[in-house]
Amino acid sequence: NDTTERWCGRLEIVRTTQGRVTGSQAWPFDAAADSAQSWSIDDPALVPTGQNDLLVVSTSDRRAVHQPQLRSADARPQYDVDVRPSRDGVTITVAASTLVRELCVFADRVDPHAVCDRQLITLLPGEVAVIEVVTRQREAGVWRDALDVTSGRSTVLRTLGDRTPGRDEAPVR
């Protein structure tokens, strides 16, 4: 707890394999200001055994995702993207097929005055993020081209692990 106030609640750790929950355990916690706590993981179902395993640790307002056996050669995120015009600009919807870490839309590369309502998004397989972009450029086709969804070489939509030297396949389907 890096804050100056007490933090209490329930901590849950979940192991997933290819998007399916394979184990979980929860603990109550009560952390004084500027303190730390630790727990032992007693459930063998929470021990990662393969590269498709994720550990998701969450409280009511925080979440951390860890892929213990991540191999960079297999880490390229897979996701689908949809762009639609909205009242104030465009709505970008990203649906993850794999773990997508630190998703960002660099909207100012399309319109210098554009602003996204959220950034640095981590999605588990099957999760969807909706990003509202306030912009004067409301043509979905312009955004689709900028997001370069078909080739996967976008400089506007980026994620951790979407670029690996020497790899030609696109990160999106």
Image: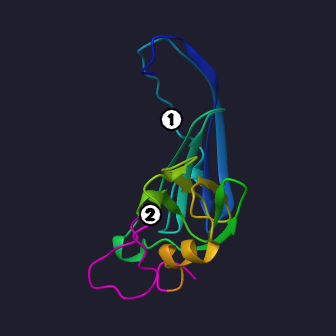
Q: Residue at x 53, y 54 (%)?
A: 122
Find numbered disc 1 in the image and state the secondary structure of the residue it sits on. Answer: loop
Q: Foreground: 58 or 146?
A: 146
Q: Residue at x 48, y 74 (%)?
A: 146
> Residue 96: horizontal and vertical position, in percent?
61, 67
Q: Amino acid at mark 1?
A: Ser
Find numbered disc 2 in the image and state the secondary structure of the residue it sits on. Answer: strand
Q: Residue at x 54, y 12 (%)?
A: 6
Q: Is residue 64 magenta?
A: no
Q: Is residue 29 above or below residue 117?
A: above
> Residue 42: horizontal and vertical position, in percent?
57, 41
- Residue at the spot of label 2: 159
- Residue at the spot of label 1: 40
* Residue placed furthest toward the left: 165
Chain-order first, disc 2 or disc 1: 1
> Residue 171: horizontal and vertical position, in percent?
48, 78
Badge 1: how crowded within 10 Å, few (<14), some, or many (20+)?
A: few
Q: Amino acid at mark 2?
A: Thr
* Residue placed furthest toward the right: 87
> Residue 70: horizontal and vertical position, in percent?
41, 65
Magenta region's main secondary structure? loop
